[in-house]
Image (cartoon, coloured by chain):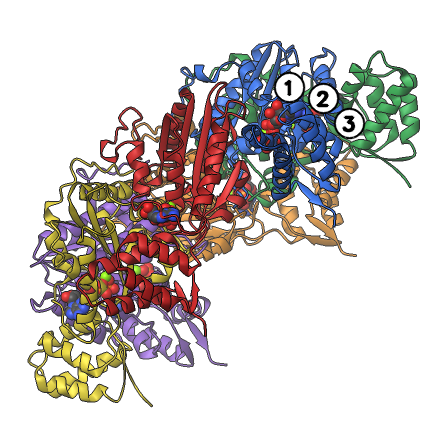
Chain colours: A orange, B purple, C yellow, D red, E blue, F green
Amino acid sequence: DFIYSLENDVKPTLGTSDDALDKFIDRGIISWGNTRELLERGHMFVKQAKSPETRNMLCLLLEGAPTAGTSALAAYLAKNSDFPFVKVITSREMVGYTESSKCLRINKIFDDAYRSELSCIFMNDLEQLMGYSPIGPRYQSLVLDALYSLLSSSPPKGRKLLVICTSKRRSVLEELGLLSMFTAVLRVPYIKEVEDVRMVLDESQAMTSSEVEAVCQHISHGDVFVGVKKLMGLLDTMRVMKGVDPQKRVAAFCNLLEDEGIYTPTV
Amino acid sequence: DFIYSLENDVKPTLGTSDDALDKFIDRGIISWGNTRELLERGHMFVKQAKSPETRNMLCLLLEGAPTAGTSALAAYLAKNSDFPFVKVITSREMVGYTESSKCLRINKIFDDAYRSELSCIFMNDLEQLMGYSPIGPRYQSLVLDALYSLLSSSPPKGRKLLVICTSKRRSVLEELGLLSMFTAVLRVPYIKEVEDVRMVLDESQAMTSSEVEAVCQHISHGDVFVGVKKLMGLLDTMRVMKGVDPQKRVAAFCNLLEDEGIYTPTV
Amino acid sequence: DFIYSLENDVKPTLGTSDDALDKFIDRGIISWGNTRELLERGHMFVKQAKSPETRNMLCLLLEGAPTAGTSALAAYLAKNSDFPFVKVITSREMVGYTESSKCLRINKIFDDAYRSELSCIFMNDLEQLMGYSPIGPRYQSLVLDALYSLLSSSPPKGRKLLVICTSKRRSVLEELGLLSMFTAVLRVPYIKEVEDVRMVLDESQAMTSSEVEAVCQHISHGDVFVGVKKLMGLLDTMRVMKGVDPQKRVAAFCNLLEDEGIYTPTV
Amino acid sequence: DFIYSLENDVKPTLGTSDDALDKFIDRGIISWGNTRELLERGHMFVKQAKSPETRNMLCLLLEGAPTAGTSALAAYLAKNSDFPFVKVITSREMVGYTESSKCLRINKIFDDAYRSELSCIFMNDLEQLMGYSPIGPRYQSLVLDALYSLLSSSPPKGRKLLVICTSKRRSVLEELGLLSMFTAVLRVPYIKEVEDVRMVLDESQAMTSSEVEAVCQHISHGDVFVGVKKLMGLLDTMRVMKGVDPQKRVAAFCNLLEDEGIYTPTV
Amino acid sequence: DFIYSLENDVKPTLGTSDDALDKFIDRGIISWGNTRELLERGHMFVKQAKSPETRNMLCLLLEGAPTAGTSALAAYLAKNSDFPFVKVITSREMVGYTESSKCLRINKIFDDAYRSELSCIFMNDLEQLMGYSPIGPRYQSLVLDALYSLLSSSPPKGRKLLVICTSKRRSVLEELGLLSMFTAVLRVPYIKEVEDVRMVLDESQAMTSSEVEAVCQHISHGDVFVGVKKLMGLLDTMRVMKGVDPQKRVAAFCNLLEDEGIYTPTV
Amino acid sequence: DFIYSLENDVKPTLGTSDDALDKFIDRGIISWGNTRELLERGHMFVKQAKSPETRNMLCLLLEGAPTAGTSALAAYLAKNSDFPFVKVITSREMVGYTESSKCLRINKIFDDAYRSELSCIFMNDLEQLMGYSPIGPRYQSLVLDALYSLLSSSPPKGRKLLVICTSKRRSVLEELGLLSMFTAVLRVPYIKEVEDVRMVLDESQAMTSSEVEAVCQHISHGDVFVGVKKLMGLLDTMRVMKGVDPQKRVAAFCNLLEDEGIYTPTV
Ligand SMILES: Nc1ncnc2c1ncn2[C@@H]1O[C@H](COP(=O)(O)OP(=O)(O)OP(=O)(O)O)[C@@H](O)[C@H]1O
Ligand SMILES: Nc1ncnc2c1ncn2[C@@H]1O[C@H](COP(=O)(O)OP(=O)(O)OP(=O)(O)O)[C@@H](O)[C@H]1O
Ligand SMILES: Nc1ncnc2c1ncn2[C@@H]1O[C@H](COP(=O)(O)OP(=O)(O)OP(=O)(O)O)[C@@H](O)[C@H]1O
Ligand SMILES: Nc1ncnc2c1ncn2[C@@H]1O[C@H](COP(=O)(O)OP(=O)(O)OP(=O)(O)O)[C@@H](O)[C@H]1O
Ligand SMILES: Nc1ncnc2c1ncn2[C@@H]1O[C@H](COP(=O)(O)OP(=O)(O)OP(=O)(O)O)[C@@H](O)[C@H]1O
Ligand SMILES: Nc1ncnc2c1ncn2[C@@H]1O[C@H](COP(=O)(O)OP(=O)(O)OP(=O)(O)O)[C@@H](O)[C@H]1O
Ligand SMILES: [Mg+2]
Ligand SMILES: [Mg+2]
Ligand SMILES: [Mg+2]
Ligand SMILES: [Mg+2]
Ligand SMILES: [Mg+2]
Ligand SMILES: [Mg+2]
């Protein structure tokens, strides 16, 4: 068994909380569609969490399908919360931990947060944190219990805590009874409009504007459905195809969109 | 594995039992609907537990749907029981404990209680204490056994013990055979009457009385169904919307009630 | 894991075996209905266990629904067995034990008993001892194995052992193959007759005889079905209602009987 | 966990192998029905196991319903095998052992046996040894594997080993693939004939011959089906009823036979 | 837990690999039916494994019903492979090992084999090695993984490894995906012809030739189906019946064949 | 339990990463059918992973049925990636590891990779790495979690990581939610054309060209379906049959193809 030493858990290579948050927003936030509105609503809750007149614990959940950009938006909110104490919890730092060690680690972060007057904890992908897997289904009961206990109990008097979480499996959280622990749940949508695709393509600067125009022209004859992260990933392939003839690049990209099931031409 | 040291289990940051109980009643008790009657019946059992003529063990269960206010009322009873020894057991303090450590901890609290002539133990959310989760379903057998053993055996001669528990899943306790361990079971209801909503809104002082009036006017055209904790939580959003125009605040709050499924207008 | 130290298992607070047995008979034995006959049959087996002409191992099971008074009667038999070595095994003393430690503890008690010429072991609630729970169902295989082995093997030559057990789930013991280990099985019934209720009410002295009369009068118009422990528990509520008007007390008690499903008036 | 120390496993209280075997035959062998024939067949295999011309490993199984007398007959064969090294394996000595410790213990006994030229190992109730229980069903895989490995591999050259086992659940052994490991399987039957009952009653000397006659007269009008151990157990009750009137004793015993489902009168 | 010390794993009592192989062939190889052909095909693969032009890893499986003689033939191939390094792996030496220790032990043998230029590993009863049991079904995943990894990865450059395995449950290996790891699979059949029975009877010299003749005469009127090991086992009974009248011996043996379901007369 | 010492994990016998990769390509790459094209597409992604303009993490999956040659092609890509840090992860080096140790080991390799500017990790047979087995089904949740966490989180700023994985069970990865972690998935096909068989036979030089011609002639009258590894394995049998008459060799090989279900003549 892996004995996790609480004293020596310095992981200098992983950097500060700010670095950790930045890693989720590595490509910035492109304000397509309702991104701005969503962030504003999120900010409202951050404000509510800070206010001395409200409950001293507020839990916010951002949930969306894979690659929707959920983690980036949640990290953005945490980063811009202006809370003096911000802490990031991801399953990445706890690879190989036993259930018990995982619980102790998460618990410690909450205990640390209780010591600060205003604290914010960012927990990415709750279902992954508790080792959820659909075959079985399986999950780590101890971690679920810990999350349940931590989200349902408030910090000591005079301390305020904001917890921002993300999830890709809202239905699982609901079934496990975790959803009702949140003060508010915000849904992060997929990109469906050609105009939103255009905005992402433009901003990412992987193509010339005439190429973007040609792509948008092409996909206007069907349905688009894609997460912002996925779309930006495909643009990387364009970046490598630099010297190539624009028409070929446009064709290649349109093919990619169709192959990956992102663009479906209407029959 | 986590070795829980019985000797060093001083958790000064969590404070005294009184603080722990207070945390559950952080917004006071608003005496809407049958709150008073419920507390009186509860107090009757507290009195019975104290009486030298009765059995030396009495177990009381308060059960209600999530956010019904179950924990606050149970904590209130424990706090006002005038028992010299009061101890609080919640899953929060046992995050990451192995089943065995959990049992030892709970057992120790009962053993401590046996040493005092009159003791009261408050256990919040029994099903959560035993790690119950509906997917499986799963629960910690050792903890269930411990609860079963502790609730079914009485303190030594000349000692009296009152155990007050809460639960959100009465049916689970029943299926596990725990329900029959209780001398009495009290149900904490949801708010259904407009007058009760008004009382909570008035007392919480998050809105002006004319705003309250407008809200009550609005919701009188349908059905209301909400736990007191949930209702008070929504009022926090109002608290942050301080400078806003009253009409907008009323509209915003009414929307919130409908969005959250608390208020359903009759068609 | 919990390492149970065999050397240090002195639990002075739990007292002697006699104290332990007395705790089960804290309200004495009221000889309603067939109580006396049942105890006589039990005593016959105690005598048989002692006789030098018989097998040197005899296992007796008392089984009844919850609150039937099973534990009190079994404890009474053990207490009055006049065996020089009497030992009590309950799940209460083994809260938090691992399966293995539980087995070792029970085993040790049997080994100790083997050293005495005449010994009696009282084991309360067998199914609880092995952590049985209906959801799953679950039970501790190691403990079941231990019970099976201990009940099926006899003490060394020249030693005689009487084992008295109780159970609330006869069918579970049967399914697990434990029932056939017993030389005899005695069933403890519920109270069904008004006359038996009267006897318990009279003897418990929680009501005046005219109150008892009024209650019996009332319930003679329907069916009664209750364990003696449950009935005596309800009388505790009467004890707290001392100053109250007799008529109200009678009404309150009759209501209680109906609410708890003990008395069903015939339509 | 329980660490079983191989060095210190001296259990002086359990005595020698001979004592252990004697405990199974505590009431001698009454030669009712085909007992003699069965023992002769068994002895044939003992002889075969000893012969230098045959395989150096022979496994014999005696199987019968509970109380059939299976263990006594198997122990009798082992005791009278005239093997210089005889070793007894029962679950009783391994209460609380982990699966692993159990395997090591059994393995050690086989290794010890390999050192002697002629050895006999007696294993009582195979299914109990591997913790079999019908709810689940459950069993200890490690122990099953160990038995499987030990029964299927022969001792080193020049060494001969006889293994005599008993079982109450032949079908379980079959399903687990253990049955085919045995060179021969002998079935121990229940008593079905009045004459066989008479022989057991006569030999056990718990009743006078006229009483025995009366009992046999009575049960000749129906069917009898009982294990010899069960029948002898019931006679113990007679032993305690010494001073009683013979007619009453006969009636009491006949009642007992009917109550326990041993004697069914033909309608 | 059992900590298997890799340093001290000298088991002098178990002897060398050659002894271990010999134990499987304790009664020699009688060349009935297609035995010779089967051994020749096996030898072909041994030759292929040795050849410097072929892959440096070859896995051969011999599979057959219980008592078919599978282990003896596989051991014979390994013994006569003329490989300088031969190692035997059976579950017998790993009784009581934890899954992990088992894996480490097997792994070590493979690592040792890698050090030799030409090595042969003999693994008996693969399904038993991984603790397979049909109730559940159960098996040890770690050991399955280990076998899978070891059989699928080849030795370092310049080293050649031949792995010869046996199995009684081909279908289980198939379902677990292990079957496709083998370069070739050879089936060991049961004896079906009277002539083959005669050859085994003759060679084993447990009966006179006229007795053999009589037996063969008798069984020619029906169907025979038996493993060579089983058949030779029954002859042991004949060996003990030495002084007996030949006719009785023949009758006894024919009865035995019928009782055990080996010989079925055609109706 | 097996405590894996991180400090001492030097396995000099297993050699360098390059050796490890070479072992997968021990028979070279024969460019039959679309092999070249597949490698080119793979190389494109290697290039993309290296480019400073793209995301700093790229995951590539090669998947194909058993013996399709998947591991060889993936290893080839990794070997020719020209990445300064290349590391190989296979289940072979982790035989007997506990889940936790496995995770720690894999985690460490990723952490090491993060320290280099450009790193490539090759993970063979993902489903085997997590101990997947279809009976149950079973898999190691901790390892799945680890893979999930490692594949979904990117290296620190300024570091680029390419992960190349293989799998034989694409559908399992899909069900477990791992498939969506990959930037691209390449399918490795089976050989279906006679011309492709010819190319493999020619290049492997196990037969003369006239023999190859004869074989191809023969199999042109039906369907061929085989992995390149399987086909090359069968040629080993030809290598041992060196002196034999060519016609016999051709016949033998054609038989082999049919026996193994590789060639099915059309009826
Ligand atoms: N409007 C936007 N919303 C979210 N992310 C954006 C937006 N614009 C650009 N991005 C970039 O897109 C990426 C979104 O990745 P993110 O990890 O948030 O996705 P995700 O939905 O959490 O994916 P996963 O399913 O892997 O968890 C980030 O690199 C972010 O910088
Ligand atoms: N009449 C009332 N009954 C209960 N709680 C009240 C009442 N009036 C005000 N409150 C306040 O409402 C809140 C009730 O919260 P409480 O934790 O008891 O709810 P709960 O039903 O236990 O919720 P949860 O489902 O989270 O366990 C407390 O802050 C308490 O101070
Ligand atoms: N005739 C009687 N039989 C049994 N108990 C009696 C009788 N008369 C009075 N009592 C009292 O009733 C109580 C019976 O409690 P006991 O613990 O035996 O019930 P139980 O059936 O074991 O309950 P549980 O279901 O909690 O195990 C004891 O306090 C005992 O003193
Ligand atoms: N013919 C007989 N066969 C077997 N046992 C006999 C016979 N005659 C007398 N006995 C006695 O009967 C008892 C049989 O008990 P034994 O333990 O063998 O039964 P069992 O079938 O193994 O019971 P259990 O189901 O408890 O294992 C022994 O005390 C033995 O001395
Ligand atoms: N032609 C033969 N083939 C195999 N075994 C033979 C042959 N002739 C004689 N024997 C002997 O028969 C016995 C076969 O036993 P073996 O252990 O190989 O059987 P098995 O099928 O592996 O049995 P099990 O089901 O117990 O594993 C050996 O003692 C061997 O010496
Ligand atoms: N075009 C090719 N593609 C792949 N492998 C080839 C090719 N040509 C020759 N080979 C050789 O074929 C073998 C393919 O083996 P490889 O281990 O890659 O197969 P696999 O599909 O991974 O098999 P397994 O199912 O055992 O994992 C290697 O020895 C490789 O050198
Ligand atoms: Mg995310
Ligand atoms: Mg609560
Ligand atoms: Mg009881
Ligand atoms: Mg027996
Ligand atoms: Mg074999
Ligand atoms: Mg491969």
* Chain letter of disc 3 in the image: F
Query: Are labels 1 and 2 assigned to the same chain?
Result: yes
Three-letter residue code for mark 1: Tyr
Q: Are marks 1 and 2 in contact (CB under 8 Å)?
A: yes
Residue C96, position as x, y percentages in the image = 26, 46
Q: Quadrant of ligand 2?
A: bottom left
> Alpha-carbon distance for marks 2 and 3?
40 Å
Residue A30, position as x, y percentages in the image = 56, 44
- Cβ(mark 1) to ligand 5 < 8 Å? yes
Residues packed near mark 2 inside 10 Å, few (<14), some (14 to 19) or many (20 plus):
some
Three-letter residue code for mark 2: Leu
Residue under label 2 = E39
Identify the element where label 3 is drawn: helix
Residue B163, position as x, y percentages in the image = 19, 60
Residues packed near mark 1 inside 10 Å, few (<14), some (14 to 19) or many (20 plus):
some
Which numbered disc flags the more N-terminal residue, 1 or 2? 2
Residue under label 3 = F35
> Alpha-carbon distance for marks 3 and 1?
43 Å
Residue under label 1 = E76
Foreground disc of the pair 2, 3: 2
Foreground disc of the pair 3, 1: 1
Q: Quadrant of the N terminus of chain B?
A: top left
Out of A16 and B70, give the one closest to the viewer. B70
Q: Are marks 3 and 1 in contact (CB under 8 Å)?
A: no
Whether residue F170 sits left or right of residue F113 in the image: it is right
Whether residue D252 sits left or right of residue C207 in the image: it is right
